[in-house]
Image (cartoon, grey):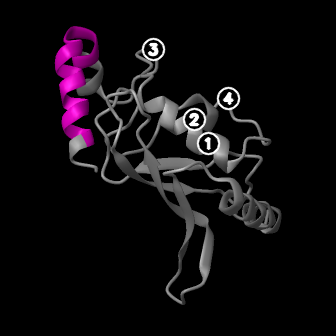
Amino acid sequence: MDGSFALSRLKQERKEWRKTHPYGFVARPTKNENQILDYFEWDCIVPGKKGTLWAGGKFKMKLYFPEDYPASPPKARFVPPLFHVNCYPSGTVCLSILSDGWKPGINLKQIMLGIQNWFDDPNPESPAQRPALELFLKDRGEYDQKIREQTAQNL
């Protein structure tokens, strides 16, 4: 597949995003060495949700869209990586809507909101990071403190 359908879909999603994105969120295609938009790699910021340990944080993330998007989901990676039960040490997000729960109708807004909800809803049944999992299961107070500290570093 040459990616032309994916490119068309991503351009449409960018257009919709610019009109209707939720407050505090950022998602924009990167630019290549010739300053041309690269719709297959996006720079994003996901804000922490009010009323959670993540509130006030602004977490930098990359979205990488495959050439067969939307048949296949994008990959999401936090830069720098986050301390989270479902975040791999590389920063890659482990989330069902970005893997086996993917549906081609899922759009950029749903992905971004899903990731925001993911912050405060760790799934110990699908761990991606052993230190975070162990702390989450053995000492929730200390886990929560690490999340608070991480949030304070991402304001």
Residue at x 34% of width, y 42% of height: 56
Disc 2 is placed on an element classified as helix
* Residue 85 on the magenta span: no
Residue 16 appearing in the image: yes
Marks 3 and 4, Cα distance to the nearest angstrom?
15 Å
Q: Sequence-wise, which precedes: disc 1 or disc 3?
A: 1
| Classed neighbour count for the residue bearing mark 2: other residues with Cα under 10 Å, few (<14), some (14–19), many (≥20) | some
Closer to the camera, 105 or 23?
23
Residue 99 appearing in the image: no
Which disc, if any, is residue 33? none
Q: Sequence-wise, which precedes: disc 3 or disc 4?
A: 4
x then y, percent, for residue 76 = 50, 48
Residue topped by disc 4: 101
Range covered by the magenta-colored residues: 135-151
Q: Report the mark closest to the observer, 1 or 3.
A: 1
| Classed neighbour count for the residue bearing mark 3: other residues with Cα under 10 Å, few (<14), some (14–19), many (≥20) | few
Residue at x 57% of width, y 35% of height: 114
Residue topped by disc 2: 114
Marks 3 and 2, Cα distance to the nearest angstrom?
18 Å
Main SS, magenta region, reads helix
Q: What residue type is labelled 2?
A: Gly
Marks 2 and 1, Cα distance to the nearest angstrom?
5 Å
Closer to the camera, 123 or 16?
16
